[in-house]
Amino acid sequence: MDFRRTMLGRRLAWAVLAGATLLAGAALPAQAWEPTKQVTFIIPAGTGGGADQMARFIQGVVGKHNLMKQPIVVINKAGGAGAEGFLEVKKSKGDAHQIIITLSNLFTTPMATGVPFNWKEMTPVAMLALDQFVLWVNSDTPYKTAKDYIEAVKAGADKQFKMGGTGSKQEDQIITVALESVTGGKKFTYVPFAGGGAVAVQLVGKHVDSTVNNPIEAVAQWRAGGLRPLCIFDDKRSSYTTKVTDTMAWSDIPTCKESGVDVDYQMLRGIFMPAGVTKEQVAFYVDLFKKVRETPDWKEFMEKGAFNNTFMTGDEYAKWVEAAEKRHYELMKSAGFLAAGR
Amino acid sequence: MREQEDASDEPSLVSNRVLEIVVALLLLGISAIIIYDSVRLGIGWAEGEGPRAGYFPFYIAVVLATASISILLKAVMGKGDGLSDSFVSRSAIGRVITVLVPAIIYVGAVQFIGLYTASAAFIFFFMIFVGGESVLRAIGVALGVPIFFFVMFEKWFLVPLPKGPIEAMLGF
Amino acid sequence: MEEIASLMQGFSIALTPYNLALMFVGIVLGVVIGVLPGLGGANGVAILLPLTFSMPPTSAIIMLSCIYWGALFGGAITSILFNIPGEPWSVATTFDGHPMARQGRADEALTAAFTSSFVGAFVAVVVITFLAPVIARFALQFGPAEFFSVFFLTFASFVGMGRGSASKTLAAMALGFALAAVGMDGVTGQLRMTFGYDELLGGFDFLIAVIGLFGIGEILSSMEDGLKFQGSEAKLRLTVVLTTWKKLLAYWVTSIRSCIIGCWMGITPGGATPASFMSYGLAKRMSPRGANFGKGEMEGVVAPETAAHAAGTSALLPMLTLGIPGSPTAAVLLGGLLIWGLQPGPLLFVEQKEFVWGLIASMYLGNIVGLIVVLTCVPMFAAILRIPFSIIAPVILVICAIGAYTVNNNMFDVWMMLVFGVVGYVFNKLRYPLAPLVLAIVLGDKAEEAFRQSMLLSQGNLSIFWANPLVATIMSLGLAMLIWPLASALKARFGHARSATAA
């Protein structure tokens, strides 16, 4: 189920535009265009979540290393599972002083709610990283591997096992539904909470049986011995080998596929701009984020959250997003999460 | 504790009874809208999802409707509780309107000329025509306050507020 | 006592002239942020965050947390002076604080509020210092059912608070719940009551409702009374702090009760907002002066302020040990910790001893510095009310508009603020109580979410609310609170009927 390699549906117009952007970015000096006033950085999610943390971190890094003359202002527009933020960008056509960080709600929100927006109404700038998902259980439970846990779910009553997650009909619930393909017809009871940190605490407090928290949301509880990671929803193990706990590093967590659970899913942490901006303007931000990624702070941040540190821009990025959208459509469709008429 | 000097001897515009009825009917209308939308979303139990999205609002709307019917009945049939007293006198509502209408114009203007310019104009006109302050004083406050907020929000806290052509002319 | 040794070491870290200066800067900035409804603590923290990279982490977090203290103090100022609560937990402060200001006792109300905040926060810091590891574990017991029971208790202790008729109280509360339900439903992800309007996606923010209902409504009411803001004859008394302190001593029972409620709600983590409402409700019921509540009773300022600050302070504990932020400001602080490479979590107290104890020491010092700063400014704040209404009214309206706009950077919200203003004016005149309406807007969606999460977990079995001693106790307390006014109302009616027949 790896959708990064399925390059379906190539849109020529995008390719040409994005290719030109790349060329322009390479050929012209970086000073070709730069912001003339403060840049608004929209987060289509609430304060304290993964996207919020990353955006505020970027704001801090840009300030700390003086990467831009104008300041960045971070604004949360979380209403309607982020629809508010995306609609704002859609509305601000041609405004080069606005960028937005995305998570999976770029795809899931319009599909699940029918709110009219699509990533094609924005200009893709860069993929900063892919966020991982890990299957967690409370460390007091007897499950040592993903296989143990799935067997227990199979053996239990339908809906006996409770999966805690962030939001409804978004990435956590999509993964939960995907997991149900290997549980022999037994379903999870999916319980949505407002934020990832709260989800991890609910698992430590044994109010739910498992979660699919992002690494950064659960790492503190893992280190303190409250949680146990079972498997990572990626096709290969994490590349971070520094020990996180006394005995384990991120790279010691087996992939779910290794454990016999053939599900993989990563979440886009990427940047978009409003439509109708010039290629010089896009190039400025591509360059800015390249600089951000070169800082030691960024590397540390990536390692702490066990991010898949993939960087993409232009054509490649647009194609990735296109494929990801297709995959989300299929996942949402098979889960029955699509809004009427979608 | 409010001064009631004008309540008794000035002509009443509308009685409490009428307004009670209007508000109760409005609340009843709101509960009807909520019930309509809740039924669309489902008010029962969804397998695996728990109570449906309309479950909670539906019962809230039922409570609202019951309460507003009770208020309505009391207003129509009741006697006491100052129902026949004046809700507002003509001169009092006049004063309320002298602040409400400029406020509406002000909010409308923010969309076109930006918050700072609109605020300056609003403060200026309010002070002169409603407050009867001297022109000099009005100019001082009308310029000082928006400039203070501009520095505070745009420069210091980097909170972007709506800006219009004048700010654009100055390069913001 | 290991804690005392650690704390002393913490003081030695925090008590440098450099750190004290940073505290001062943080407090002043925090007060400014708390006063202007357009700025949240999140703004201040976020803006200062880049500046703090050049400092050692302990100094940086001291300054940032002082913004937090300052904002907590500052929130009371606009609530008391203009009836505009800048933060959800300041709403209950307006109930008696603003009437006091209207009576020309703004300085007393402010002193009472600041002092109570300080007492609440201070007690909470002491609790954090000595009980941190124990209570941190306690928070883990809070699942959806426990959260719902806390919200239930809050509503239950507040029912019957309004002076209006029962049906008007119910109608106001139901309207609040309905407004809170607008937008996306967090459990199913469906859109509710938006009817295709993008503006309604985010629902109604409490701040917009409160700025309109209280702030604009107040201006309209003042206009009706003539061009006058009551309380403009505010006296300026330099000894007010001392005389008010003397009066405050009489309310020690309320203070202790509010501290307990606040600490408990902060740690669990139910939050400062339910704490303030619950504390106000209980104080009204239990105080011999309960009948005066809402008319400018100082005890009605003491109760919510003490509880809100005890809760706001003790809420930092779950943030540090569990990584759950209790408020948006705390969330940004959390982000700050991450940037400095400090991972909030159970191990923070073990691995980052110097940092944690420096922070705890700065809580003591920050609150003391904060109290001194705000108390010296009381006459200045009170003097604001002496500005003529014809100047202050348009300025307040502009501030309200800015505040409403900045919530979601949306003009629609500013229009909604005006609508709420008219609603507030009309409701006030028809004696619909505003407090239950606001309480329902603030907590309605959280209560609903917790209820439905519980129902999911139990598959529809209501027994989940009596499943363990903790949740059963809270629910029973709530039920008792509900029955209390009903019983006394019945008793009153019965007694009344008897006397009527006798006559």
Image (spheres, rainbow, N blue to C red):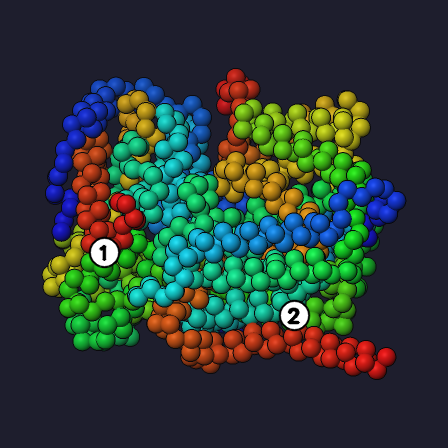
* Mark 2 neighbour class, 10 Å CA radius: few under 14, some 14 to 19, many 20 or more: many
Mark 1 residue element: helix
Instruction: Classify residue C382 as left or right of residue A284.
Output: right
Q: Amino acid at mark 1?
A: Ala
Instruction: Classify residue B154 as left or right of residue C105.
Output: left
Residues C281 and B31: in front is B31
Residue A157 visible in this rendered orientation of the protein: yes
Q: Which residue is mark 2?
A: C282
Residue at x-position 15% and y-position 46% = A3
Residues C36 and B120: in front is B120
* Mark 1 neighbour class, 10 Å CA radius: few under 14, some 14 to 19, many 20 or more: some
The chain carrying label 2 is: C
- Residue A207 horizontal/vertical position (percent): 36, 70
The chain carrying label 1 is: A
Q: Amino acid at mark 2?
A: Leu
Residues C398 and A307: in front is C398
- Residue C407 horizontal/vertical position (percent): 52, 43
Numbered label tally? 2
Q: Quadrant of residue C136?
A: bottom left
Q: Quadrant of residue C94?
A: bottom right
- Residue C484 horizontal/vertical position (percent): 64, 76
Note whether C243 is above or below C286 in the view shown.
above
Residues at badges 2 and 1 in contact (C-beta under 8 Å)? no
Numbered tag placed on residue B27 in the rendering: none
Numbered tag placed on residue A335 in the rendering: 1
- Residue C144 horizontal/vertical position (percent): 42, 68
Q: Are marks 2 and 1 on the same chain?
A: no
Note whether A97 is above or below A198 in the view shown.
above
Residue at x-position 38% and y-position 37% = A87
Mark 2 residue element: helix
Residues B147 and C165: in front is C165
